[in-house]
Image (cartoon, rainbow, N blue to C red):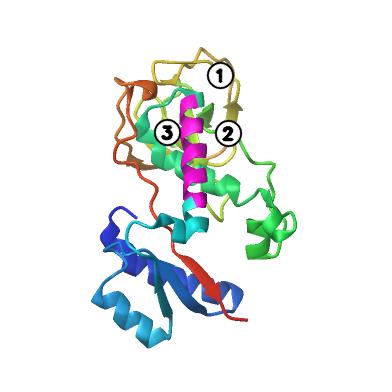
Amino acid sequence: MKAKGEAFEKFKQYKALVENKIGHKIKVLRFNNRGEFVSKKFDAFFVECGIQQQTSAPYSPQQNSVAECVNRTIMEWAKNMILAQGLNLEFWGEAMNMTVYIKNRCPTKALDSKTLQEAWSGRKPDVFHLRVFGCKAFAHVPDEKRTKLKSKSMPCVFLRYYEGTKVYRLMCVETKRIIKSRDDVFIEGSKEIGGVPHFEKEENIVVREEVEEEEPLTFSRNTPLHETRMEGVQSEFTPSFSLEE
């Protein structure tokens, strides 16, 4: 979500997705008393769908201990990935998405060593495509977007994956634009300087896949992460659901 005001529409989308995917209906929604979940729209929707509401007492995160623990774990993983790669705080959203993607593919005792992805889809996840967050990569530049004398590949920073596809999300080092690419060359042991990976000259790296440009990514190279406080990045409560048999 780009804003908390989108919570209602996002919940409706999630409800439709989960009920269609696993064939069960949401019976209970547990949340704290944050404003994005306490509204007349939510109340009317809960009554219409027969969903029971459970709220925690104000300033009592321990009553949502499972959700709070997961949120804290995700935040710590994401922070450590950013620090390990020397990236700036602007990448925290990408790191959070990557963390959730990886966590969903890790075995858990709660499911008898199954992964969350397997419990959700019924299939063991494929992990051979996993790459190191923030490593350098080289994406192929299509013939239509370059002249004969220009390089066939562009240096990028690997950010994360796109769910449901075999496409990687990369950031071009030169333009700071987000691009999509499938088969890339990854240099996972690269050295890094100045807040972004430092790309030494590489020869004869050619990737034969198309690249699709996306939106530009606002990016600052002036302040290293270790000198930047994690202000404005707080662990938000994630609703937990109880599904009927």
Q: Quadrant of the C terminus?
A: bottom right
Crowdedness of circle 1 by 10 Å Cα count: few (<14), some, many (20+)? some
Residue under the image location 45 percent in, 61 percent down: 63
Secondary structure found at label 1: loop
Q: Amino acid at mark 3?
A: Met
Task: Provide residue 130's location: percent of width, then percent of height.
Answer: 63, 39
Task: Provide residue 180's location: percent of width, then percent of height.
Answer: 47, 42
Pick whichever of labels 2 and 3 is earlier in the sequence.
3
CA separation, marks 2 and 3?
13 Å
Asked if residue 80 is among those painted magenta in the image, a careful observer would answer yes
Residue to which mark 3 is pinned = 171
Residue to which mark 2 is pinned = 184
Left or right, 200 with respect to 235, comes to right
Residue 214 vertical placement versus 68 (above, below): above
In the image as oriented, which residue stretches furthest toward the right?
A: 112
Residue to which mark 1 is pinned = 190
The boundaries of the magenta stretch are: 69-83
